[in-house]
């Protein structure tokens, strides 16, 4: 009887240990939630966003003018996307949420430096989903 009790106790201890191990693994930090089909289906640059639509679509802007990037994404929800605005060796990042299977969002940057700009949209893993170019020049705008 003592051997049977010892065997049962050993089996219970092993079961509890295995359960604790599984729970510990599940509670570790979750990997980035990237929707496998996350994609930018439309992207536009303009002077404003009104009613979830780009206004004043353009690729050339006045110096110090706000430049809006409007996006339509599919395949979400997913972790934040990153919008990176680049001019020469200067780089500025903005994080945006993707909250649904088809999602509209936007970001803006004041074009305070004249010249050629690149705006890229990347997923949580750093994969570039879309890239657009624009130019800022001339006199200070709005």
Image (tube, rainbow, N blue to C red):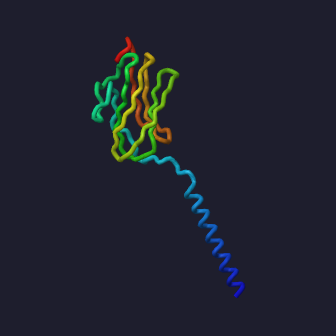
* Up/down of 55 relative to 115, above or below: below
Q: Residue at x 44, y 18 (%)?
A: 112
Kindly indicate the quadrant of the structure image that contains residue 54. top left
Q: Position of residue 141 (x, y in %)?
A: 35, 16
Kindly indicate the quadrant of the structure image that contains residue 56. top left
- Quadrant where the N terminus is found in the figure: bottom right
Q: Position of residue 37 (x, y in %)?
A: 40, 46
Query: Please, which residue is most extreme toward the right here?
Result: 2
For the image, the number of numbered tags is 0
* Up/down of 142 relative to 2, above or below: above
Query: Please, which residue is most extreme toward the bottom here?
Result: 1
Q: Residue at x 36, y 37 (%)?
A: 105
Nearer the observer, 126 or 25:
25
Q: Residue at x 42, y 41 (%)?
A: 97
Kindly indicate the quadrant of the structure image that contains residue 62. top left
- Quadrant where the C terminus is found in the figure: top left
Q: Residue at x 48, y 31 (%)?
A: 93
Q: Position of residue 9 (x, y in %)?
A: 67, 77
Q: Position of residue 10 (x, y in %)?
A: 68, 76
């Amino acid at each position: 009887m003592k051997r049977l009790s010892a065997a049962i106790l050993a089996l219970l201890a092993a079961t509890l240990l295995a359960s604790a191990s599984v729970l510990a693994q599940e509670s570790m930090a979750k990997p980035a939630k990237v929707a496998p089909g996350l994609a930018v289906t439309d992207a536009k640059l303009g002077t404003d966003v009104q009613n979830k639509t780009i206004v004043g679509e353009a690729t050339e802007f006045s110096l110090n003018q706000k430049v809006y990037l409007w996006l339509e994404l599919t395949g979400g929800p997913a972790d934040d996307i990153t919008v990176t605005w680049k001019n020469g060796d200067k780089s500025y990042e903005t994080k945006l949420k993707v909250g649904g299977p088809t999602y509209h969002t936007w970001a803006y940057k004041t074009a305070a430096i004249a010249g050629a700009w690149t705006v890229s949209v990347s997923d949580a893993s750093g994969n570039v989903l879309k890239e657009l170019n624009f130019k800022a020049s001339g006199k200070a705008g709005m």
